[in-house]
Image (spheres, rainbow, N blue to C red):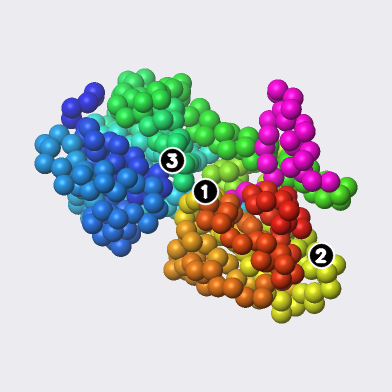
């Protein structure tokens, strides 16, 4: 094995997970950042980053490094991968329209790596999967395209990503990293590799399946907890009391966990539970709690839209043809990530009522929104005679808006995040 100096690392996939990983490893080793998206490669080569996750000064420094043992370069040419011996795969693992795992990016990446794999190489997966996926789905692809034998000629590891987009405090190196390997020696190697960059330390899991399962349940747990408070919000709405008031009161007890209601989207919490459920169902067990939580969370956008419509009707607004403003489209605050955003549910539901809906988000990319969701996003707020305003995402820029002006003009304001001053809201989750 390598144990340090001979590491030649390739990071496959340069999104929210892969780029920070490439930057950190490049401070110690020679790293090739690979992505099939050529515009993404071109942008990174000139020191730009559309995800806003990278330290651009650090990125530029690594790109210009003259150090023989460290530094970073980017490529979309598979031939550049041939000199590498550690391959870390960080491609997306989404769900399809039937809410089933879509492994196509992962399997295509495995096929590509299989074609350049050599004896002694290690392939490490960071993409979120169900327990067993690495060894049962990915390894056969690597074997087929390399002609090599698993755990004899090449080896695998799994280290689940824990990137939190938009978080400037809990960054890659400050979050403890779970590691694993396909043999005891490889597990040690993988753990040693990550220990070089993770200052928070590592946790070596006893098997790849355990590491895969740990990732699935950490997000499924949050999903179920949020679904509980979302269901409480539905109940308290009928009772006529404020959910945040109830949570603040209950939170005075030391062991109460103050989860907040809201839209649950993104690349982790809104997706990972379906991977765990898929594996469970393939083994003959239909999960009750996990899927019931998913159903509650998936319906929150529709609840918000319908609540706003009811408030408009109560004020005598005709609904159809009225102008509505949605503040925010990214799946979370202070971040441009629009993957699996549930704000789209609010948008589509209001459209079905015949309303004229404007979505304003200073963080999200309008071109990407148009491509992925099929409507025009505004990056600049244009004042119109809005009859309803929905605060869907708590971007910091939204704190400075003149809600008093909107309120005095007769607009209904619904705050899904309990984010703005309460005196301006008509309702909130």
Gap between marks 3 and 2 measured at Cα: 39 Å
Q: Is residue 202 left or right of residue 357?
A: left
Please say whether residue 354 is one of the residues in the magenta stretch: no
Closer to the eye: label 3 or 1:
3
Please report contact status of discs 3 and 1: CB closer than 8 Å, yes or no: no
The residue labelled by disc 1 is: 267
Regarding residue 61, the answer to whether it shows in the image is yes
Horizontal and vertical percent for residue 223? Answer: 64, 41
Q: Could you tell which of marks 2 and 1 lies nearer the N-terminus?
A: 1
Picture quarter with the N terminus: top left
* Contact check, label 2 and label 1, Cβ < 8 Å: no
Which residue is the site of mark 2? Answer: 310
Q: Nearer the viewer, mark 2 or mark 1?
A: 2
Q: Residue at x 22, y 32 (%)?
A: 28
Q: Earlier in the sequence, mark 3 or mark 2?
A: 3
Q: Secondary structure at mark 1?
A: loop
Q: Nearer the viewer, residue 400 or 151?
A: 400
Task: Tell me whether circle 3 and circle 2 mark residues in contact (CB < 8 Å).
Answer: no
SS at mark 2 in the image = helix
Q: Residues within 10 Å of mark 2 (few under 14, many from 20)?
A: some
**Labelled disc at residue 168:** 3
| Disc 3 to disc 1, C-alpha distance | 18 Å
The magenta region covers 241-266
Residue at far right of view: 239
**Secondary structure state at the residue bearing disc 3:** loop
Identity of the residue drawn at 24% across and 23% down:
3
Res. 147 visible in picture: no
Residue 146 lies, in percent from the top left, at 28, 43
Overall secondary structure of the magenta section: loop
Q: Quadrant of residue 352?
A: bottom right
Badge 3: few (under 14), some or many (20 or more) residues near its Cα, within 10 Å? few
């Amino acid at each position: 094995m390598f144990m340090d100096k001979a590491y030649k690392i390739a990071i496959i996939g340069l999104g929210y997970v892969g780029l920070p990983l490439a930057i950190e490893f490049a401070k110690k080793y020679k790293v090739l950042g690979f992505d099939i998206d050529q515009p993404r490669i071109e942008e990174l080569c000139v020191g730009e980053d559309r995800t806003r996750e990278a330290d651009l000064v650090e990125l530029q420094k690594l790109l210009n490094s003259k150090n023989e043992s460290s530094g970073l370069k980017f490529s979309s040419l598979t031939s550049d991968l041939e000199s590498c011996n550690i391959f870390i795969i960080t491609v997306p693992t989404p769900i399809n329209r039937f809410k089933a795992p879509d492994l196509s990016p992962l399997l295509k990446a495995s096929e590509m790596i299989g074609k350049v794999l050599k004896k002694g190489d290690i392939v490490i997966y960071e993409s979120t999967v169900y327990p067993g996926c690495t060894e049962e789905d990915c390894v056969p692809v690597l074997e087929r395209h390399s002609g090599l034998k698993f755990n004899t000629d090449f080896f695998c590891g799994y280290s689940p990503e824990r990137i939190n987009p938009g978080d400037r405090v809990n960054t890659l190196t400050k979050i403890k990293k779970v590691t694993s390997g396909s043999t005891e020696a490889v597990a040690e190697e993988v753990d040693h590799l990550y220990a070089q960059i993770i200052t928070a330390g590592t946790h070596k899991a006893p098997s790849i399946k355990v590491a895969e399962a740990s990732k699935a349940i950490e997000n499924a747990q949050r999903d179920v907890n949020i679904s509980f408070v979302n269901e409480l919000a539905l109940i308290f709405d009928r009772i006529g009391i404020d959910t945040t008031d109830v949570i603040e009161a209950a939170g005075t007890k030391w062991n109460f966990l103050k989860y907040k209601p809201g839209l649950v989207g993104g690349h982790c919490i809104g997706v990972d539970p379906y991977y765990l459920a898929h594996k469970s169902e393939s083994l003959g067990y239909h999960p009750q709690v996990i899927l019931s939580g998913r159903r509650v969370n998936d319906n929150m956008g529709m609840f918000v839209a319908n609540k706003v419509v009811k408030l408009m009707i109560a004020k005598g607004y005709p609904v159809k043809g009225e102008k509505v403003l949605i503040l925010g489209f990214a799946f979370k605050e202070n971040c441009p990530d629009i993957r699996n955003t549930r704000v789209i549910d609010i948008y589509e539901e209001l459209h079905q009522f015949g309303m004229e809906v404007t979505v304003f988000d200073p963080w999200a990319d309008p071109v990407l929104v148009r491509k992925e969701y099929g409507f025009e996003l505004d990056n600049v707020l244009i004042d119109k005679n809005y009859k309803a305003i929905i605060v869907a995402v708590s971007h910091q820029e939204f704190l400075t808006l003149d809600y008093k002006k909107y309120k005095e003009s007769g607009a209904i304001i619904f705050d899904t995040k309990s984010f703005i001053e309460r005196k301006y809201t008509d309702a909130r989750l």
